[in-house]
Amino acid sequence: MKTIVFAGPSVFDLDVRAFPHLEFHPPAASGDILAAVDRGATAIGLIDGLYGDRAAVWHKEILYALSKDIPVAGAASMGALRAAECEPFGMIGIGEVFRAYRNGVRTSDADVAIVHAPAELGYRPLTIALVDAEATIGGMSDALDDKDITRLLNAARRQHFSVRTWKSIVAQAGLDPGLTKTLAGNAISVKQTDALQLLTALRDEGLSRENLPRWAFQDTLFFRSMAACRRGWDRGKNG
């Protein structure tokens, strides 16, 4: 059995040594799911993915893995997005973020987007995802009045993911700068909770291949082109 997991900032301060049988890889970009299939993955977990300066994971390569009877599960970030989109084809979604996208409560991929450090720094999150900001602020009802909570939520929602920090949220809300430390000290990460749930499921339960929907994979010219480029790149890197 070979379970490959793509993760980065969502598992930054988790002790992944608790999952010794999972093979961890950096956040996935276009072609990485295909490469995991080629490397003999028997199950794939997608948590974090790259975007912006890299093409994001293709839906088509997820469908390709599923067509090979390889279970694919997603949670927390890019994994939750792709799971909500590919669930009709058998991708497994796990966690609160996935359910919010599947049920239409959330529609923007920016709600889970952040800026993070490079691999050399362990993909440390540098900004705050809106899903985590909302969970944290909403959980402060015992310490803050409704007016301040509303101001903080509105500030967090107005900010671009690339600049959203506790300091910037508090400043834009026009509140006491000392509140920054309070929010940081009471931070809730829905993304991390969902990521941990996925890792635990992969470790303890595995992913069921039963009751998968029936459909036929369409081997299109575009998919063949992407696959050829990725496989050629892998051969060059390993040769």
Image (tube, rainbow, N blue to C red):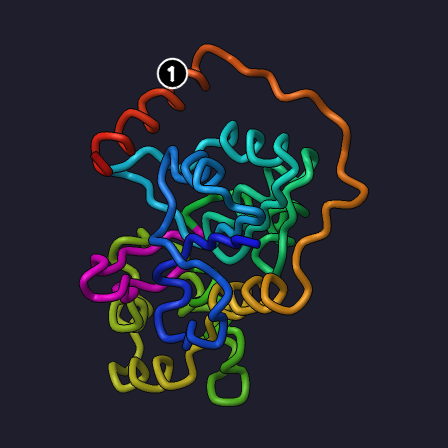
Residue at the spot 49% in from the left edge and 82% down from the top edge: 140
Residue at the spot 33% in from the left edge and 28% down from the top edge: 230
Residue 147 at least partly seen: no
User: Which quarter of the figure is the C terminus placed in?
Assistant: top left
Residue 201 percent location from the top left of the image: 63, 64
Q: Residue furthest front?
A: 239
Residue 214 percent location from the top left of the image: 77, 28
Front-most of residues 44 and 123: 44
Q: Which residue is mark 1?
A: 225
Front-most of residues 219 and 176: 219
Using residue 55 as the reference point, say whether residue 70 is left or right of it: right
Q: Residue furthest top?
A: 221
Residue 31 percent location from the top left of the image: 38, 33
User: Which amino acid, mark 1?
Assistant: Ser
Using residue 224 as the reference point, say whether residue 128 is left or right of it: left
User: Which quarter of the figure is the N terminus placed in?
Assistant: bottom right
Residue at the spot 28% in from the left edge and 82% down from the top edge: 176
Q: Is residue 64 magenta?
A: no
* 67 over 52 or under it: above or below: above
Q: Which residues are magenta?
A: 111-129
Query: What secondary structure prevails in the magenta region?
Result: loop
Using residue 119 as the reference point, say whether residue 89 is left or right of it: right
Residue at the spot 62% in from the left edge and 21% down from the top edge: 217
Crowd around label 1: few <14 · some 14–19 · many ≥20 (10 Å): few
For numbered disc 1, what is the local secondary structure? helix
Using residue 76 as the reference point, say whether residue 96 is left or right of it: right
